[in-house]
Image (spheres, grey):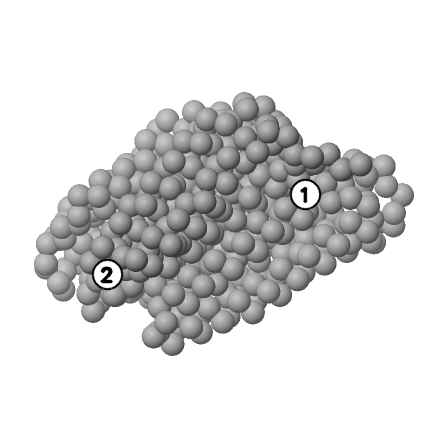
Amino acid sequence: MTTLPSANDFLLVAPELFLLGMICAVLVIDVFLSDAQRNVTYWLAQFTLAATGALVLIVDPGVKVVAFAGTFVSDPLAVLLKLFVLGVTIAVFVYSRPYMRDRGLFRGEYFVLGLAGVLGMLVLISAHSLLTIYLGLELMSLALYAMVAFQRDSRRASESAMKYFVLGALASGLLLYGMSILYGLTGSLDIAAISAALVQSSHPSVAVGLAVVFVVAGVAFKLGAVPFHMWVPDVYEGSPTSVTLYLSTVTKIAAFAMVIRLLAEALPSTHVQWSGMLELLVILSLAVGNIVAIAQHSIKRMLAYSTISHVGFVFMGVFAGTDNGYAAAMFYVLTYALMSAGAFGMVALLSRKGFEAENLEDFKGLNERSPWLAFIMLLLMFSMAGVPPTVGFYAKLMVLQSVVQVNQEWLALYAVIMSVIGAFYYLRAIKFVYFDKAEDKTPLRPGLDVGVVMSANGLAMLALGVLPGALMAYCTAAVAGL
């Protein structure tokens, strides 16, 4: 007999319901606004994100609570990831506004699609059923496909959107096929029921292994791990920088949530099978990401390959299969989202009307134009490279410790070597900023909002590196509550 949803069930999804209502309201209001009034849409979008974050905190039960007949879960992990998704999206919208205004792209569709993508992410983060996972993933993905093609008169953006759509559809199909096999083996879509059924399962290991292969392939594509990385450099480079900002940050948090829900919660009993696949993904992602990035002259492509290498570190924490490993991977993906937001935000800031700051050479002499922004760029690059005392160093250290604890010292050593190789291209960016003469000596004067958010973004790299304890403790507590 089907149980009807209770009032408490609807209370737990209040943030998602509010966000859905505001998306509809923003969409309708934007129709009646002129181009000169487009700031109204922007501020409505920012209010929506802030209010949704407040609701997440208000309705937080503090413990794991499952609602809607096991399809939706609210737990400490979901709360933390949702708050980061909403907070980083606010920063992304701040960085994007001047960039889009200069290019005639300051339209309501960007904010509506961005909010729709966030709704998909929130659903994905709180998914407790294979069906809910897929619904959240597709809602997020459909918004992303449209955002990549947002600049309609750009052939490069249209080509990137087509690549992303075709490969994304293939990856979704693989993931759905893996889910269908799991359903066939266990007779349930509920994550907890699947986990329990597989522990007691007498099904052939080949069938379970086939399901795991398809599931891992699907999540590896969404995070951009090698060999499922083909779309990352082209889509990052072809999209408007405002869209690349969005793609490179919050989507990684949502994809990480999917990894945890599927591998750590639904398939812990198959750790031996999926850990071997993750090990291969880690080795390939670290090598390809760091080595190929060295040859890039476009900073967007360089950061795209950098993303691939960072995904390798995230998967390394998950590979460990322990609470410490999951917590380290979670800490890594959250801090990486902040690093990426700042890095691509800087690309958007240096761009101006009729000019895209897409090449490393465009950062020449940034210190002459704005010493403060040069310092922020220094912190961001040092953090991505893992140089102490920035947060990137601590994040890498936690992941390395988690694999050492499961007696995989060789993998930790390999990751350190790849990180040393990868430090080269980050230091090369800093060399352009500080040691090359500026070709354009126009002083950089970002707006107050962009300047404040960029400063906070950069200084967070230092603050979280010096005082990482609070965030790491929350990540540990969140993982322990799974």
The residue lying furthest to the left in this view is: 442
Marked residue nearer the N-terminal end (1 or 2): 2
When the figure is inspected, residue 259 is found, relative to residue 437, above or below; the finding is above
Between 443 and 315, the residue placed more toward the observer is 443
Q: What secondary structure is found at the residue carrying circle 1? A: loop
Q: Tell me the residue at 70%/40% (across/down).
A: 191
Does residue 415 appear anywhere in the picture?
no
Direction from residue 389 to residue 5 in the image, left or right: right
Direction from residue 407 to residue 340 in the image, left or right: left
Does residue 194 appear anywhere in the picture?
yes
Q: Tell me the residue at 54%/54% (across/down).
A: 139
Q: Tell me the residue at 75%/54% (across/down).
A: 180
The residue lying furthest to the right in this view is: 202
Q: Amino acid at mark 1?
A: Ser
Badge 2: residue crowd in 10 Å (few <14, some 14–19, many ≥20)? few
Q: How many marks?
A: 2
Marks 1 and 2, how far apart in space? 42 Å
When the figure is inspected, residue 436 is found, relative to residue 77, above or below; the finding is below
Q: Quadrant of the N terminus?
A: top right
Residue position for label 2: 35
Residue position for label 1: 129
Badge 1: residue crowd in 10 Å (few <14, some 14–19, many ≥20)? many
Labels 1 & 2 near each other (Cβ < 8 A)? no
Q: Amino acid at mark 2?
A: Asp
Q: Quadrant of the C terminus?
A: top right
When the figure is inspected, residue 100 is found, relative to residue 115, above or below; the finding is below
Q: What secondary structure is found at the residue carrying circle 2? A: helix
The percent coordinates of residue 235 (x first, y second) are: 44, 65
The percent coordinates of residue 202 (x first, y second) are: 89, 43
The percent coordinates of residue 10 (x first, y second) are: 57, 33
The percent coordinates of residue 461 (x first, y second) are: 33, 38
